[in-house]
Amino acid sequence: MSATPSVPLPGQAAAPTAVPVVPRPWRNRVLAAGVAALVVALAVGGWVYLHPSGPGAGFVSGNGRVEATEIDLATKLGGRVEEILVNEGDFVQSGQLLARMRIDVLSAQRDETRAQSRQAVNAVASAEAQVSAKQSETVAAQATVVLRASEQDAAQRRFTRTENLANKGALPQQNLDDDRAAVHGAEAAIKAAQAQVAAAQAATRSAQAQLAGAKSGVAASEATIARVEADIVDSALKSPRDGRVQYRVAQPGEVLAGGGKVLNLVDLSDVYLTFYLAEAVAGRVALGSEVRIVLDAAPQYVIPAQVSYVASVAQFTPKTVETKSERQKLMFRVKAQFSKELLVKHIKLVKTGLPGVAWLKLDATAEWPANLAIKVPQ
């Protein structure tokens, strides 16, 4: 039978609770485990105290992410996407054809403009013929003026002789009147011929103006053809530089407006890690300073870089940046540029968006510790 616990009566003290007796071997084991745990804790604390996590006071670090120059491959003119020749993740080279836009309308415009150009060339030929004809008419009119001047001179001489003879009574008055009329007629004929010369010259200038207009039409049509052909060339979207396709923004068959994005590329030869430093430290960082970067995805490697940019204006601490003090509200943005030769050598290993830690040496006399010695993939 189980023992029933006794309940103290009013006014009586409670009976003391019985303490279970632990056998001596078990008690020794518990004591030994506690001592061992205390020794381990002291050892870990001493190691942490004697071996700090950072390389020293002459260094500073910042958390950041790997970024690269992004390029949006977009259409120059609105239209329908005919074909996309690459997929996301593909490596592309500068000048490589990546996508095509439909060019039916542009081809029709080019053919129409070529026909207009031929018409303009024909108009030039016609205008040139008109100029030649008007110039011939001008020459003929000028010859007529010379002829009428000769006739006027002869009539004037005859009139002079007739007048002398009539005054002496050798000729009748009628002959004098006829020769005087002949002189006036010759003078009128000269004026008429001169008017014809002026009219022919005006017609020549008009024909020359038409010729200039026709030539301008040819030049305009040729310029239009060149523009349409340039639009056709731009409808074949080519990569502006070496890189990798990050996103296919559009798909074949979609209609895009002018400037519509088709692909998003990243230039893997222009990669950097962006991180933030406190205002008390940023002022000591010079452009070109050596940086050692350790990525979370590859902690076994230490990648060299150089400071290529330090913001001139402080900004509020981004939410993704961890700071040692909550009072560090303002930070400076810093970019550490990776070596282009190193990026090209390991182009297929380069990834953007990877987090990492950037270490900078503020003390020129300090030596990089062994754990931050450069170590890159072979």
Image (cartoon, rainbow, N blue to C red):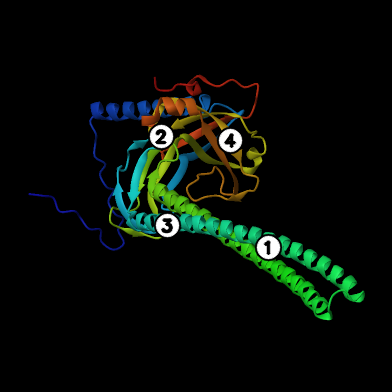
Say which element carries label 4.
strand
First-in-chain label (1 vs 2) = 1
Reading the image, the residue beneath label 2 is: 296
Task: Calculate the distance from the C-alpha at mark 3 to the C-alpha at mark 1.
Answer: 46 Å
Q: Three-letter amino acid code at disc 2?
A: Asp
Task: Calculate the distance from the C-alpha at mark 2 to the C-alpha at mark 4.
Answer: 22 Å
Q: Residue at x 55, y 60 (%)?
A: 130
Q: Is 70 rendered above or below residue 21?
A: below
Contact check, label 2 and label 4, Cβ < 8 Å: no
Q: Three-letter amino acid code at disc 3?
A: Thr
Q: Residue at x 66, y 63 (%)?
A: 141
Contact check, label 1 and label 2, Cβ < 8 Å: no
Task: Calculate the distance from the C-alpha at mark 1 to the C-alpha at mark 2.
Answer: 101 Å
For discs 4 and 3, the disc positioned in front in the rendered view: 3
Say which element carries label 2.
loop
The tag on residue 113 is 3
Return the residue nearer the eye: 244 or 301: 244
Q: Three-letter amino acid code at disc 4?
A: Ser
For discs 3 and 2, the disc positioned in front in the rendered view: 3
Task: Calculate the distance from the C-alpha at mark 4 to the C-alpha at mark 3.
Answer: 51 Å
Say which element carries label 3.
helix
Q: Residue furthest front?
A: 170
Contact check, label 4 and label 1, Cβ < 8 Å: no
**Quarter of the figure with residue 156:** bottom right
Say which element carries label 1.
helix
First-in-chain label (4 vs 1) = 1
Dot 2 alpha-carbon crowd within 10 angstroms: few under 14, some 14 to 19, many 20 or more: few
- Could you tell whether 71 is left or right of 104 in the image? right
The tag on residue 308 is 4
Contact check, label 4 and label 3, Cβ < 8 Å: no
For discs 3 and 1, the disc positioned in front in the rendered view: 1
